[in-house]
């Protein structure tokens, strides 16, 4: 298409808006985070990296309208696209933490420069025939591409390359460089002042980011919203249709109606996420709400804001993307990390901000009544919250204090507390909790990675003494453990609090689970392949930390009850030696699941063959005593 025709039709602007959204969503929100995880950047290191991105985004959003070195909008846009492409390609390499910090800053800076430059000068490239429709097309197409199943499900390397490639395509678009005469906002009903628009967009981005983080980090919600091709195709179509509807609403009804529709649909989706049964409906309302405000987030600073000059339009765009875009997103993610849900009170607060015009009119007409009502409510809150607290400081229980230690020490980064239903988890780690039980925690600690065992029912599998010994020296009581020592926690009592919390993670199990353990035997094929020599090697690797090769205990001082001497016994938990097969099976159960009520831990993660080999070696190399010896 010739460049003049492309400009008149708005093809340049549509492509640039779509590229910007794809880069932000597919790369900055998905691929880059997965690259960080693959590189071992997690826990306490993740926040500084993401903070660097936010700092870069805020800085360039605010500075872009004020930089005079590159007056040409085409040049600025191309510099931003080059920076974004370079940042995406740099993430493909195995970087150190400091390099990831620099790359994250470059991502934010590139996006800050790109978004503010684009919307400030969008009238150059969006076309004059149907500018609002073209903005909607760019937004809808961008979201549709992001939900394209092969791209959404691709590796982070492929997603990074795709984002970089789209930026390079944008670099070679035939962009107009002629001066722009600001023509003021497009006439529409009920125009929205800048400060109110800023507050509304901040509330909406905050709401969206919180919901996005919760869905992304909750397996059951993620499976019901954007996992699988059918979900992705449906999301893409919903985004596109909602974006086109937004263009019609902006033209016919004005921005206030769009903001109202966005907060209602997005808020309703957040409330539906509180109930597992509402996930399907949430997967419909969430993309609709996101696309409604996303179109407005581009259209307002570029076409609708009441700016008197191009410079003012740029400054307004900078504040919107710095505060609403970057700060609002960070606040939403932080809230969901701490609470694990979007509180209904916050949904109501966001709705009140967006629907402020109604309350404002009410305030003007009924000011005296509202002041009296507010005074009564404040007095009631003071009586309820302030007065009872005087002289009655609430003391946290040891278990509650231990939970705080668990959170502050980042245990969630290596241990989950979520037994996946209908999987091998149930036998290894204990009965599964229901979603409602998980959601009742504040905040939920289900985790999203497992470098160590699941801890949902650890109090049923490990004694307080074993847990304490493990914190002091993990490798001493678990021979293959890579966990660092946390012995320093016991110097001020935090270690005892943490042990108390972990010991409390035991709901008593279930008869069905207990029966499954008692009936468990190594698979027949695994038992047939058992090898005593391999069992001896496994014993030396996993069991010698409590029992050395000759049967003498090494950790007598750490446990109130000394582990038995395997050379002589007695063995109170084994059948008589005459019942050889029963004895072999019982040895396998003890090696696999430990002995509840004692300090003997299980080795749930070992295979049936390994367990059968250990039990075979034990049957041949330990005392063949009766239980009463």
Image: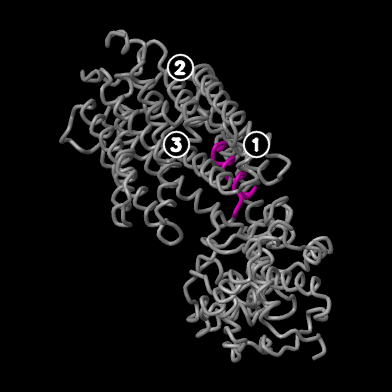
Position of residue 604 relative to residue 128, above or below, is below
Observer-nearest of 223 and 517: 517
Few, some or many residues within 10 Å of mark 3 (<14, 14–19, 20+):
some
Observer-nearest of 247 and 576: 576
Q: Quadrant of the N terminus?
A: top left
Position of residue 292 relative to residue 537, above or below, is above
- Image x and y of residue 82, in percent: 25, 34
Q: Which residue is mark 1?
A: 282
Q: Which residue is mark 3?
A: 25
> Which residues, given as a range, are shown in magenta?
340-356
- Image x and y of residue 319, in percent: 36, 40
Q: Which residue is mark 2?
A: 133
* In contact (CB < 8 Å): disc 3 and disc 1: no
Observer-nearest of 536 and 209: 536
Residue 389 included in the magenta stretch of the image: no
Circle nearer the N terminus (3, 1): 3
Q: Main secondary structure of the magenta part?
A: helix
Q: Could you tell me how far apart the alpha carbons at marks 2 and 3 are, in whole angstroms?
A: 22 Å
On the question of residue 388 being in view, the answer is no
Q: Could you tell me how far apart the alpha carbons at marks 2 and 1 are, in whole angstroms?
A: 26 Å
Q: Could you tell me how far apart the alpha carbons at marks 3 and 1 are, in whole angstroms?
A: 20 Å
- Image x and y of residue 242, in percent: 55, 24
Q: Secondary structure at mark 2?
A: helix
């Amino acid at each position: 298409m010739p460049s003049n025709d492309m400009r008149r039709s708005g093809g340049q602007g549509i492509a640039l808006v779509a590229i910007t959204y794809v880069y932000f969503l597919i790369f900055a929100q998905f691929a880059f985070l997965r690259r960080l995880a693959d590189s071992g950047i997690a826990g306490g290191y993740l926040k500084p990296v993401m903070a660097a991105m936010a700092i870069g985004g805020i800085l360039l959003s605010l500075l872009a309208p004020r930089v005079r070195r590159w007056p040409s909008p085409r040049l600025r846009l191309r510099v931003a696209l080059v920076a974004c492409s370079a940042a995406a390609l740099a993430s493909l390499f195995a970087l150190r933490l400091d390099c990831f910090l620099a790359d994250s800053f470059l991502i934010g800076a590139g996006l800050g420069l790109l978004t503010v430059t684009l919307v400030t000068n969008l009238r150059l490239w969006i076309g004059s025939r149907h500018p609002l429709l073209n903005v909607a097309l760019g937004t809808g197409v961008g979201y549709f591409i992001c939900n394209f199943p092969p791209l959404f499900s691709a590796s982070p390397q492929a997603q990074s390359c795709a984002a970089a490639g789209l930026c390079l395509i944008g670099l070679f678009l035939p962009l107009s460089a002629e001066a722009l005469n600001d023509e003021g906002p497009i006439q529409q009903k009920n125009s929205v002042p800048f400060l109110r628009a800023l507050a509304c967009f901040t509330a909406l981005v905050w709401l969206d980011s919180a919901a996005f983080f919760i869905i992304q980090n909750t397996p059951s919600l993620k499976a019901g919203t954007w996992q699988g091709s059918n979900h992705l195709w449906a999301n893409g179509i919903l985004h596109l249709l909602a974006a086109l509807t937004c263009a019609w609403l902006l033209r016919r009804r004005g921005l206030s109606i769009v903001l109202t529709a966005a907060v209602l649909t997005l808020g309703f989706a957040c409330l539906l996420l509180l109930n597992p049964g509402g996930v399907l409906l949430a997967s419909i309302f969430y993309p609709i709400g996101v696309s409604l405000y996303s179109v407005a987030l581009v259209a307002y600073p570029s076409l609708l804001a009441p700016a008197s000059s191009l410079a003012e339009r740029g400054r307004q765009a900078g504040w919107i993307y710095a505060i609403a875009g970057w700060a609002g997103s960070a606040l939403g993610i932080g809230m969901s990390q701490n609470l694990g849900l979007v509180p209904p009170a916050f949904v109501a607060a966001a709705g009140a901000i967006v629907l402020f015009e109604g309350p404002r009119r009410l305030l003007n007409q009924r000011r005296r009544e509202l002041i009296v009502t507010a005074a009564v409510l404040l007095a009631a809150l003071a009586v309820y919250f302030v007065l009872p607290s005087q002289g009655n400081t609430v003391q946290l229980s040891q278990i509650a204090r231990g939970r705080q230690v668990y959170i502050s020490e980042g245990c969630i980064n290596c241990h989950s507390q979520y037994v996946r239903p209908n999987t091998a988890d149930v036998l290894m780690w204990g009965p599964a909790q229901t979603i409602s039980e998980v959601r009742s925690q504040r905040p939920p600690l289900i985790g999203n990675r497992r470098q160590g065992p699941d801890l949902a029912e650890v109090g049923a599998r490990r004694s307080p003494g074993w847990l304490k010994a493990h914190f002091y020296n993990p490798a001493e009581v678990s021979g293959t453990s890579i966990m660092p020592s946390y012995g320093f926690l016991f110097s001020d009592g935090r270690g005892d609090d943490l042990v108390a919390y972990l010991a409390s993670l035991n709901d008593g199990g279930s008869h069905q689970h207990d029966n499954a353990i008692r009936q468990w035997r190594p698979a027949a094929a695994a038992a047939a392949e058992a090898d005593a020599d391999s069992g001896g090697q496994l014993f030396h690797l996993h069991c010698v930390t409590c029992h050395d090769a000759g049967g003498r205990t090494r950790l007598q001082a750490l446990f109130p009850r000394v582990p038995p001497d395997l050379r002589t016994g007695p063995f109170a938990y084994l059948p008589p030696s005459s019942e050889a097969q029963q004895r072999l099976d019982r040895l396998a159960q003890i090696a696999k699941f430990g002995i509840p009520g004692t300090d003997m831990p299980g080795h749930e993660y070992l295979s049936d063959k390994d367990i059968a080999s250990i039990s075979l070696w034990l049957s041949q190399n330990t005392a063949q005593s009766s239980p009463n010896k």
